Image: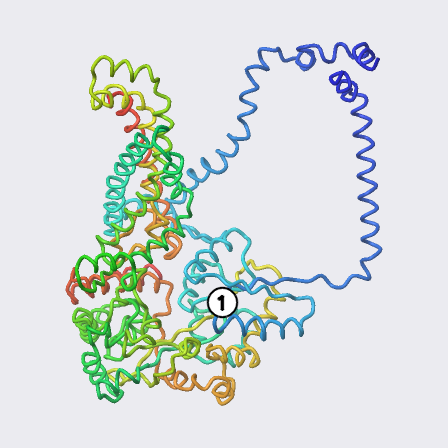
Amino acid sequence: MIEEVGLERHPVDFAPGAASRRSGLSHKARRIATPYLLLIPALVMYAVFTVYPIIRQFDLSFYNWHIFPGASNPFVGWSNYTAIFHDPVVRTASINTFLFIVITVPVQMAIGLFAAAVLTDRLPGSIFWRAAVYIPVVTSWVVVSWIFSYIFASQGGVANWVVSLFAGHTVSIDWTAQTWTGNAVIWLLSIWKGVGWSFIIFLAALDGIPRQLLESARIDGATERRVWRHVVLPSIRGAITFVTVLLVIGAAQVFTQIYEITKGGPYNSTQSLMTYMYQTAFSNFFFGYAAAMASLLALILFGFSVLEIRVLRTQDV
Amino acid sequence: MKSSIGKRWCSRKTMTSLIAVATVAASGAFIGLSGAGAASASQRPKATVTLDFWNAYNDVTEIPVMNATVIPKFEAENPGIKVNDDVLPYDGMLQKFIAASAAGSPPNLMRSDIAWVPQLASEGILLETSKQSWFPTVKAQADPGPLSTNYFKGGYYGIPDDTNTQVFFWNHADFAAAHLSPPTTWNQMIADAKKLTIPSKGQHGLGVDSTDIWNVGPYVWTDGGNFTNKALTSATGYINGKATENAVSTLVSLYKSGVIGSDMVGGSGSISGETGFPTGGYAMYFDGPWAPTSYKAAGFTGYSTALIPKGPGGSVSVVGGEDLVIPRNAPNMADTIKFVRFLQSPFAQLAMAGAGDMAAYKVDSAAEAKENPALKIFAKELLTARARPVTQAYGQLDTDFSNEVALMLAGKVSVSAGLNTATQEANKALAAGS
């Protein structure tokens, strides 16, 4: 009875397209507009938290900017940018950041891909091993940085204990207080913690390769090396591009592990661009100069990412 | 069936009625609540104000006294004001403070390292205390040295909270084993440091915790050197002056021969002097007034303190300490100032002296010594101690000097070349800050 009353009293209200007819929008227009309307919250967030800070940062880079609202901020033109090219610490930090990228990114990708290929469903205990490879990803950067500091402590550290065992006498290497050993500790930690991320992406990509493709290649007599070169790697090219671009962007922004382990020392020799920017802005209060460095880095990374995507899309892997 | 019910409930007329009823009900409730609020307003006690006090007090000595003695007394004397003792790690406190102040949500008060005050003042973050009506009283009561650390370009931007300096600590067992008596001159201390270095025992003669001015300053000043001129406008002839070069050369040579331990270069894994001195890692060490309490807590009593042995420049240690700074845009300013005044009162100053914080005001020195007898030697050393350059450029100057000394220790630059570079950088920083 209720149903009937409802239908009788409001047959037009719920007919398809009735609302749009009332509001003057056709069904087609609504269908086109809906996705854009749904995108609005995300776009607003993106504009407020990403686009605006980037534009504001670029704006700040032309001033001798003071953080407190209402302070006088003299316009200095391009001088913050020209100073970057004469700053020896920027040179050291750029070299360290570049080394960090070229060392940690390929190693993480290689180990991640190897682990994804080895830890297949057929391997006994594969779930355990997959979890073991992935667990470092979910640990806190700060906590693991401190753990690595203890491992590489000059006195009482595990690393020195191991070296002492091999050396046959007590060794007291000050790992984190020297340039190359300090950098090596940071690289090692970053690779250990980052491998799981590449691994999980490659695992998904490898799972997506049609089995028939691999089987037909093998039936045609292709060796495993040829199967990988001509079937597997081209099939996961998208994943490789994705992992490379994101790892490079992430590596260029290396911060926490350096800040926690060496603080950029000794004598700025383990400084990265991000740690130096932070120190410039929040310890020395040169916000405009730090903003100029950040803008330049963003520009370089953007250009590099575009280049990377183009190269990886056009070339056979 | 279900959809029909939904249709019926969603009809425009029904919805309009429901919204109207809900609006009326909500308004009624609001009016009712407001009425209840108005009725009880006269009976309600004055609202409690909570003051956020940021500091980096240590948990062994300072926090217990602040929370069990100082704050309860203030709160008892000032009903309606609560103090939230917000203890932060020293490393990130400055950064957090400037970010919070710029964002408009600063704490009411921060216990700032004396070296940060000119920097924060230059950014326009701090309340100029010298413009406050109560400041002349504070100025009259404060010791001139700690007070001067609040000075920036013609005004004061904080008030002293506590002061400190470093004195000479020597290990009884190490000296007895080497048949030595404690040094009274600079040269004797250097000679003893060499004799007290025993690599097989992991024992260094001297502990120097870093290459920064807080740690290296006493060595430079006592040896007759300095960092800038009095006007804080130039480092030429000071950082790269002959006396400073002699002092730094001595330190570099002691480090390279293993007399000074790896704590000087730092790194997260190195053993600090304060950790290594009680465990036999360093036979001699310069440390502050907090050390006796820490050593006592660790059960270490086999040491004595003395004035820093006299060198060509005298016995010159470094002035340390903290100032109380108020952000310009801090809320509840009047209540904050009440708390600030309380912290500089003899009651709070003497209570914190028991925790190793030397009073920065002319309180009865006998009372302070009674509260904490170990402070006596520090008070004496303070008479000849020197402040680090009080300038907004100090952070940059200190970083550049420290990095150059670290490069010298690593053998990457000669002492004279490193000091010349540090001088050039210091001059740039001083010029930018003038």
Q: Would residue A3 be seen by someone viewing this image from the given angle?
A: yes
Q: Nearer the viewer, residue A92 or A149?
A: A149
Residue B373 figure quarter: bottom left
The quadrant of the picture occupied by the N terminus of chain B is top right
So how many labels did they put on this image? 1
What's under tag 1, amino acid-wise?
A: Arg
Q: Would residue B427 be seen by someone viewing this image from the given angle?
A: no
In percent of width and height, residue A178 lies at 23, 57
Tell me the colour scheme of the image: rainbow
Does B242 sit left or right of B400 as displayed?
A: left
In percent of width and height, residue B19 lies at 79, 30
Q: Nearer the viewer, residue B386 or B261?
A: B261
The quadrant of the picture occupied by the C terminus of chain B is bottom left
Neighbour tally class for label 1: few under 14, some 14-19, many 20 plus, Cα within 10 Å: many
Residue bearing the label numbered 1: B111
Residue A264 figure quarter: bottom left
Does A164 sit left or right of B289 as displayed?
A: left
Above or below residue B32? Residue B57 is below
Tag 1, which secondary structure? Answer: strand
Residue A268 figure quarter: bottom left
